[in-house]
Amino acid sequence: MKHRCGLLALVWLGLTACQSADHKLSVEPEPASQDRPMPNIVLILADDLGIGDVGVYGGEVIATPNIDALAARGVQFEAGYVTHPVCSPSRAGLLTGRYQQRFGWEFNPAGRDRTSGMSRSETTLADDLRARGYATALVGKWHLGYERGYHPLDRGFDEFFGILAGGSLFIDPAEPGVESLSVRRSGRDAQFGVYRSRDLIEVEEYLTDRFTTEALDVIARQDKRPFFLYLSHTTPHTPLQATAPYLQDYQHLPDPAQRIYAAMVASLDASVGAVVDALRSAGQFDNTLIVFASDNGCAGYIGGACSNRPFAGFKRYHNEGGIRIPLILHWPQQLPAGVRYPHAVSTLDLRATFAAAAGFAGAVDLDGVDLLPHLQGFERRPPHDYLYWRSGPTQAVRDDRWKLLRYPRSRFTRADLRADGRLQPPEGGWPMQPQNGYLTVLYDLLEDPGEQHNLAERYPQVVARLQAAYDGWAQALPAEPVQRAERSTLAETEGELVQLIF
């Protein structure tokens, strides 16, 4: 065992300059077998959390000790990605392990998920795990369909407590000690309400705290079967709302948006700590694979309250700030501790990784890969040759060094934006082809992770190679999504105005 640990330490040392020489596996990994109990799996997903707002990723404003502790005891990914810079398509890619463009769920549904949802031909990681005997529970946000056939209880989950929409009021703004911004509704109706199973219920507590309580109850009740808990928080998504216990440490921040956002992240971190404590109390901590992630980068439209530093862009952008996320895997029995993994991975990889962790072969048509051999040091190659993104006409592709990004040049001006900051969509939604040509940019992500220097003209051969890879991937996709995009705005990049379609 000592020899293999030393070898693995050398492998990790060669993978990243961030490693110190004494990193070793905390435990010798065992092959999956019937002799080893199937692990519990807990996936904690934040909503619009900026990577620059997490301590271990360089955040300096908000304290995140519980998230940081997971990273210190597990694997922290330096290049963790989602498949889309907005909520619903990103979650579709995560849950299926397949690029969501393959089944037409390419854009935020903008309310159209009330009557449809993610394709019923797709199976989910919850389907996989339930079929293998896991108890499966979703607590929190779904955002992939309301009706039968699309509902969480029809997509692999034994139980559901949460919201079906993309967001909801966290608490009554009139409650004592509550600070609120961006509140557009005074209460919750059937669309934005909280459900237990398929029943609309009333919830008075701060929603983040209630989701945590429900998650702890799931853990406490699972004493005979392995369980999969998907704790899908809505924080720190708008509306910005926080309660006194979380606000008290951020009263020194004079900007109300920054103060409330910081408190919301603090409530998220407290939830992570509570889940860890519950697993310890249940004697399940060492045999639980915990994943912490965000569904996309933080939003630029909340007045500079959040941070994706050092990356450019925000939610809605295909720059790194929109798609590169905090991603941590923690599993004491099988993964090394205190490792920073440098190669590009995706939330697409979670489905295959969960299957391997549970000891069964995953679905054969996945775009994601099992990360365990890469993290345990048995596979030295990067998990992916390329990762791809498409949102209507927007295109992006990266390899282990280079990123090619093509935004549609805008034929609109900022004067065309509505009061909500968006463009009025044409009848039938936004077209899939650019209406005013492309702005093409090439970034060296190893030397320029902040995407400040466009090298497209200097390295045309790299542009051609990445474009050929992208075109090969895109040829296998449906030409048209299930629903065209209805949401779009404008942004400036490389001195030009481009259209963001989401």
Image: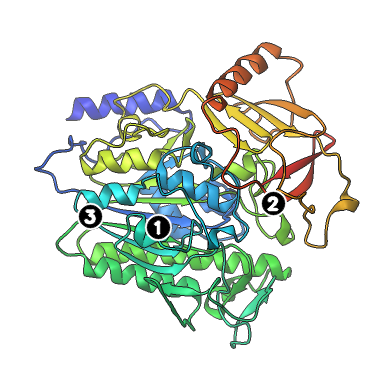
Q: Which residue is mark 1?
A: 149
**2 or 1: mark nearer the eye:** 1
The answer to whether residue 39 of the structure is visible from this angle is no
Q: Is residue 422 above or below residue 140?
A: above
Could you tell me how far apart the alpha carbons at marks 1 and 3 are, in whole angstroms?
21 Å
Q: Which residue is mark 3?
A: 134
Q: Is residue 254 above or below residue 302?
A: below
The answer to whether residue 276 of the structure is visible from this angle is yes
- The residue under the point 23% across, 49% down is 131
- The residue under the point 47% across, 81% down is 203
Could you tell me how far apart the alpha carbons at marks 2 and 1 are, in whole angstroms?
24 Å
Q: Are marks 1 and 3 in contact (CB under 8 Å)?
A: no
Q: Amino acid at mark 1?
A: Gly
* Closer to us: 490 or 25: 490
Q: Is residue 444 above or below residue 103?
A: above
Give the farthest residue toward the left: 35
Q: Amino acid at mark 2?
A: Glu
Q: Which one is earlier in the sequence, the residue at label 1 or at label 3?
A: 3
Could you tell me how far apart the alpha carbons at marks 2 and 3 are, in whole angstroms?
38 Å
- The residue under the point 63% across, 69% down is 239
* Closer to us: 501 or 353: 501
Q: Amino acid at mark 3?
A: Tyr
Residue 100: where, in percent of width, then height? Answer: 50, 41
- The residue under the point 62% across, 53% down is 298
SS for dot 3: loop
Categorize mark 3 by other alpha carbons within 10 Å: few (<14), some (14-19), many (20+).
many
Q: Which residue is mark 2?
A: 486
In the rendered view of the protein, which quadrant contains the N terminus? Answer: top left
- In the image, taking residue 153 as reference, residue 439 lies left or right, namely right
